[in-house]
């Protein structure tokens, strides 16, 4: 078991209450993964004050100097990649292959933004009068709050903190309590890389106390949040009330369209990876397959064969391809949605039950689940499950498929499998989603490209990732200079 403290003002400190909590390995709950402080409002206030104190000197550094620290942190993380991947698997549950990939993504994100530091700045704009200079400056905001989820416990803190830091902001991160170890390890890497004390702070605690402080404290000028719609909406309202900047990335109900002309073997492979990979615990996971009726039965059989081939178990064991749900509550929610779907008229084609025998006896394991005869108005077709549960909706044609895909309140990621180039391009135009994939899995993102959703998936104001991520963490100042005299 690893014992952690909060990271505030460059120091490892306990919660002011002295209270602590433990996280258990979701694959084997007999094992304590780590122990943490149980922080409250006062700890959040201390972290904000530390960031406020550190910010002016950090903002005064050049972007390149800040970028070098990000690059150094990337090197430190890379030297510890295997160790961090194992820790991630023990706490969050995903397979070691998946955890290793996620740690590598964090490494690459810091490397990317370290390099991007050489290009940060404003632009020169042609003036309509002679001997006039018109240009912009890009400046940091100040203290920003980052509220991150448990499902990508190192990648999401990385893709939020990297642009925030390289832009010259000081940050306070509140990671989800189910899997905060990776964020604390990021703090350790930055401390070793020479980040000035107080520029990055991490506070472990419940959202209502610590997250609430970030949302309401006037010293915090912006908050970037990833999590559920209900919590995101509440934080958004709190920020709007005091006119602070907000970036909310929330849920998805991501469709993969399978057209009659598709390679069904490819379609089944892509859907299985996107729906069952990461135990379905990805905001971009495929949870709806919308398929032309003429090929629905054949596709379903191929998808069932893919599900049967999945090796479910402890992610540290070689050969395992799907780990447990992150918690008892998440598992119960997944199984409840299966029961609700069947009660509403869906048919259970495969899976749908908890695994409790042998190596599964002490973990939160369930079978990958396939539901057929799903109609667009069923809850399983409209609400995010966040587990390895796929509903198959049969439609008559491409136009109906688009209508069904768009008939939900969210719009994060969407995929299509087809050989028809025209329909593929029409899909990219007509689908209501922030990310569109053609003949690819709905999960998986390029770190150099912007990411974000539409409708209730996002505030849809500022994108995350890629060079555009800088926009949320900076303001633009316009400068007019007359040198005619």
Image (cartoon, rainbow, N blue to C red):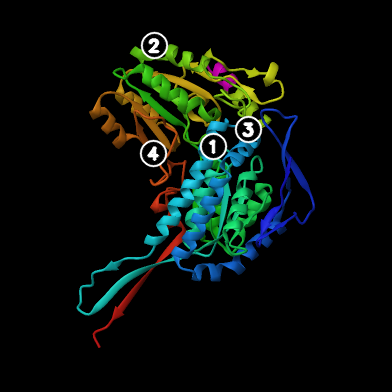
Q: In terms of secondary structure, where does tag 1 sit?
A: helix
Residue tagged 3: 326
Q: Residues within 10 Å of mark 3 (few under 14, many from 20)?
A: many
Of label 4 and label 1, which has the lower sequence position? Answer: 1
Distance (Cα) linking label 2 and label 4: 28 Å
Quadrant into which the N terminus falls: top right
Range of the magenta residues? 338-346
Given contact means CB atoms under 8 Å apart, are the residues at marks 2 and 4 in contact? no
Q: Are marks 4 and 3 in contact (CB under 8 Å)?
A: no
Residue under label 4, please give it. 435
Mark 2 or mark 1, whichever is nearer to me: 1
Q: CA distance from mark 4 to mark 3?
A: 26 Å
* Residue 283 can be seen in this image: yes
Q: Is residue 326 magenta?
A: no
Neighbourhood count class around disc 1 (C-alpha, 10 Å): few under 14, some 14–19, many 20 upward: some
The vertical placement of 86 against 313, above or below, is: below
């Amino acid at each position: 078991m690893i014992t952690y403290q909060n990271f505030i003002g460059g120091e490892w400190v306990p919660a002011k209450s002295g209270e602590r909590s433990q996280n258990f390995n979701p694959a084997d709950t007999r094992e304590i993964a780590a122990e943490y402080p149980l922080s409250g409002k006062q700890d959040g206030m201390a972290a904000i004050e530390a960031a406020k104190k550190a910010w002016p000197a950090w903002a005064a550094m050049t972007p390149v100097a800040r970028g070098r620290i990000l690059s150094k942190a990337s090197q430190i993380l890379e030297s510890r990649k295997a160790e961090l991947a194992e820790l991630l698997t023990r706490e969050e549950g995903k397979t070691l292959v998946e955890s290793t990939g996620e740690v590598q993504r964090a490494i690459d994100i810091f490397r990317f933004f370290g390099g991007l530091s050489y290009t940060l700045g404003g632009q020169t704009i042609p003036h309509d009068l002679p001997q006039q200079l018109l240009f912009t400056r890009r400046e940091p905001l100040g203290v920003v709050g980052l509220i991150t989820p448990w499902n990508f416990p190192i990648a999401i803190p990385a893709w939020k903190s990297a642009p925030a830091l390289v832009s010259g902001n000081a940050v306070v991160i509140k990671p989800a309590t189910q899997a905060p170890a990776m964020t604390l390890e990021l703090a350790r890497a930055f401390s070793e890389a020479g980040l000035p004390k107080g520029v990055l702070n991490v506070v472990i605690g419940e959202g209502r106390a610590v997250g609430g402080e970030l949302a309401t404290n006037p010293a915090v000028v912006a908050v970037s949040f990833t999590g559920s719609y209900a919590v995101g909406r509440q934080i958004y309202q709190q920020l709007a009330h005091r006119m602070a900047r907000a970036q909310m990335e929330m849920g998805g109900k991501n469709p993969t369209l399978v057209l009659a002309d598709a390679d069904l073997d490819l379609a089944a492979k892509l859907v299985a990876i996107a729906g069952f990979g990461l135990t379905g615990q990805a905001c971009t996971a495929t949870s709806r397959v919308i398929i032309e009726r003429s090929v629905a039965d054949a596709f379903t059989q191929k998808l069932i064969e893919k599900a049967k081939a999945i090796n479910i178990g402890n992610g540290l064991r070689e050969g395992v391809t799907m780990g447990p749900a992150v918690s008892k509550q998440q598992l119960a929610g997944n199984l409840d949605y299966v029961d609700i779907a069947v009660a509403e008229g869906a048919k259970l084609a495969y899976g749908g039950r908890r695994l409790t025998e042998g190596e599964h006896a002490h973990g939160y394991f369930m079978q990958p689940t396939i539901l057929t005869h799903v109609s667009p108005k069923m809850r399983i077709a409209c609400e995010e499950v966040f587990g390895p549960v796929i509903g198959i909706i049969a439609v008559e044609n491409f136009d109906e498929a688009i209508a069904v895909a768009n008939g939900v309140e969210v719009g994060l990621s969407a995929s299509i499998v087809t050989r028809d180039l025209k329909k593929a391009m029409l899909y990219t135009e007509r689908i209501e989603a922030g990310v569109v994939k053609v003949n690819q899995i709905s999960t998986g993102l390029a770190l150099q490209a912007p990411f974000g959703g539409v409708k209730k998936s996002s505030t849809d104001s500022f994108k995350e990732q890629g060079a555009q991520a800088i926009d949320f963490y900076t303001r633009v100042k316009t400068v007019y200079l007359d040198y005619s005299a």
